[in-house]
Amino acid sequence: MAVVCETNAGWLLDELSLIKGWYEVRGGPPTCEGQENTRTVYRMKDELFQLVRPYFSLNLTATSNQNTAAPSDRQDDVPPAACKPVRKKRKRANALNQGELDALEYHQKICDLILKGSQVLIREGLKNGLLRAYTPNEEENCKVISEVCVRSNNLAELCNMTKELSTLGVCEQTVNIIGSDQQSPESMDWLSHITENRSEWPQVIQLLGEKYLIPPKTSFLLSDISCMEPLLHYKKYGIIVIDPPWENKSVKRSKRYNYLSTLEIKQLPIPDLAAQNCLVITWVTNRQKHLRFVKEELYPHWSVRTLAEWHWVKITQSGEFVFPMESAHKKPYEILVLGCLIDDMDSTAWEPDFNTSPIPQHKIIVSVPCNLHSHKPPLFEILKKYVKPDVECLELFARNLQPGWTSWGNEVLKFQHLDYFIPFETEK
């Protein structure tokens, strides 16, 4: 079970258990009579979720604040390898800038909700064994996990090629079918076509000499933002999850990935991709400028009404927050803004088209984060009670795939690399 515990405050998730379930699929592809077919079953490496210590402690925070520069604009997760002794820098002025004041005011408003809700869920996790105190051996093992997480590939660079390709016409829209007798992997155009795994079992594909594991019942488009045309003629979606590459100083300095301006994010064709009453969910960093932009500018531009504001709370295996709640530098939570596409001709007449409960205004999702940078927890297990059973789901700026979902991005296969998985069973 991915949802280990549910309370009025929210959910405690076991993301590793959920991902394992995606690939432990029994049954295999059809075989010719008299021939044996061998299929390997995979699972994600456990060590990718072995986070035994917070990224930094209260003591480090207290002693380093006097000697560090202004807090980074980047508020999301950082890999454990980044936890190094803080070098002394030029002293900053004591006065907080407006962005920091806004962040402090927001934190004070939601801090108690997160603390109280998390404490109940963490206690349940400790009680049922999902969370537990770590051993010295596990702590030592955590130090070498970063070696597993540094895998990089040239997917983003590959997608730059799509800018040189002409836009496909509607009549030319075709879909790559993995494992199809009619299509060989060598003949597939990965950059300008939707690719599907329609089977009930995982498939391994090869791209530029690298192998990637594709979950069952999955479709994806590997492309740059300038080449989203195939998505527009593929399906309409009842859930759209967006994890934009927000522009900020930290990303500009590190050059870790390409970012988009707010103007470019507004140009995403969400109304064209969305079905009626589509649930739109946007991941937002703790920078208040971005949160205000989503609620006051981006959603109105897309005719999306804001319904709720949830928080993902990140903890270690022993139930500690990955960052101290009192830290001025980083926070142990990220924000999800939930909204619904409305008819802008009569927005006051909108009613939810969900099976059961309306979307709660505030919930928390508590989980041990993956050590892969910016890897977000899958949301469908907690959303399915609010949507139709057969809803079509889309994730934009995805870096991994989910069964039953369409995923798009210029690094959409990044965390599907075979290096992140191990074969644990072979069936005939």
Image (cartoon, rainbow, N blue to C red):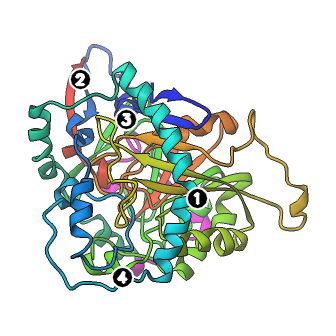
Q: How far across and down, in percent of the image, does residue 291 sit?
A: 57, 68
Q: Looking at numbered disc 3 in the image, what kind of residue is underneath it?
A: Ile
Q: Looking at numbered disc 4 in the image, what kind of residue is underneath it?
A: Asn
User: Marks 3 and 1, Cα distance to the nearest angstrom?
Assistant: 34 Å
Q: Label 3 belongs to which residue? A: 19
Q: What residue range appears in magenta?
A: 163-187
Mark 4, secondary structure of its residue: loop
Mark 2, secondary structure of its residue: loop
Q: Nearer the viewer, residue 382 or 28?
A: 382
| Front position among marks 4 and 3 | 4
Q: Label 2 belongs to which residue? A: 38
Q: Is residue 214 left or right of residue 383?
A: left
**What residue is drawn where x is 36% and y is 25%?**
126
**What residue is drawn where x is 32% and y is 80%?**
252
Q: How far across and down, in percent of the image, does residue 415 sit?
A: 30, 50
Residue 281 quadrant: bottom right
User: Marks 4 and 3, Cα distance to the nearest angstrom?
Assistant: 45 Å
- Asked if residue 233 can be seen in this view, the reply is yes
Q: Earlier in the sequence, mark 4 or mark 1?
A: 4
Q: Label 4 belongs to which residue? A: 94
Q: Earlier in the sequence, mark 2 or mark 3?
A: 3
Question: Any mark on residue 109, and which?
Answer: 1
Q: Quadrant of the C terminus?
A: top left
Q: Is residue 427 left or right of residue 183?
A: left
**What residue is drawn where x is 10% and y is 33%?**
136
Q: Residues within 10 Å of mark 4 (few under 14, many from 20)?
A: few
| Front position among marks 2 and 1 | 1
Q: Earlier in the sequence, mark 4 or mark 3?
A: 3
